[in-house]
Amino acid sequence: MLAVTTNYPLLEVFWTMLIFFAFIVWIWILFIVFADIFRRKDTSGWVKVLWIVFVILLPYLGVFVYLIAEHRGMAQRNAEQAEKAQTEMNSYIQDVAGQQSPADQIAKAKQLLDNGTISQAEFDQIKGRALAS
């Protein structure tokens, strides 16, 4: 056990961890670049193929050149995707929640009042909230 620690000092462990972390970061950037290449609608398939070949043949240089050349477009595409996802989520929530007009809310409350489910005070409160919104 002592021989292992003398052949592999703490600085080498730190260096190995640093290299491993840098490799993981590069893989992450590579996935981001490939996702952006495939998401693009402003370029043809041939341009996408050229970017992919460039990134595969010269991995580090290809990724960094793509990031430098397309950083504004990447940010814009990410913002558009986030906005689209937010719009779809809001639409889904509105569909599930079942947005009702104030007239619908009052009619439903009136029906509950007529059935005896709620009191006149509760009906007035529901009516007030519906008219306020």
Image (cartoon, rainbow, N blue to C red):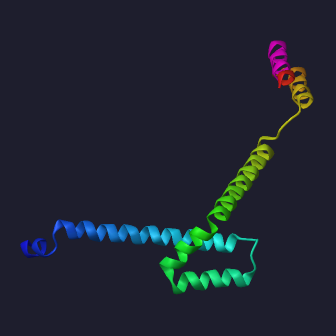
Count of marks overlaid on the render: 0
Q: Predominant secondary structure in magenta?
A: helix
Residue 115 drawn above or below residue 94: above
Indicate the position of residue 43 as horizontal and vertical percent values: 74, 76
In the picture provided, is 121 more to the left or to the right than 78? right
In the picture provided, is 28 more to the left or to the right than 112? left
Q: Residue at x 83, y 26 (%)?
A: 133
Q: Residue at x 27, y 69 (%)?
A: 15
Of the pair 41 and 4, the residue shown nearer to us: 41
Q: Residue lying at the far top in this picture: please name it.
A: 121
Quarter of the figure with residue 41: bottom right
Quarter of the figure with residue 81: bottom right
Indicate the position of residue 56 as horizontal and vertical percent values: 54, 84
Of the pair 10 and 75, the residue shown nearer to us: 75
Of the pair 10 and 102, the residue shown nearer to us: 10
Quarter of the figure with residue 38: bottom right
Q: Is residue 35 inside the magenta stretch?
A: no
Q: Is residue 124 inside the magenta stretch?
A: yes
Residue 9 drawn above or below residue 133: below
Residue 111 drawn above or below residue 55: above
In the picture provided, is 30 more to the left or to the right than 118? left
Residue 97 drawn above or below residue 124: below
In the picture provided, is 83 more to the left or to the right than 118? left
What quarter of the picture does the N terminus occupy?
A: bottom left
Of the pair 123 and 75, the residue shown nearer to us: 75
Q: Residue at x 90, y 23 (%)?
A: 110
Find the magenta span and give its range: 118-129
Indicate the position of residue 85 as horizontal and vertical percent values: 71, 55
Indicate the position of residue 60 as horizontal and vertical percent values: 48, 77
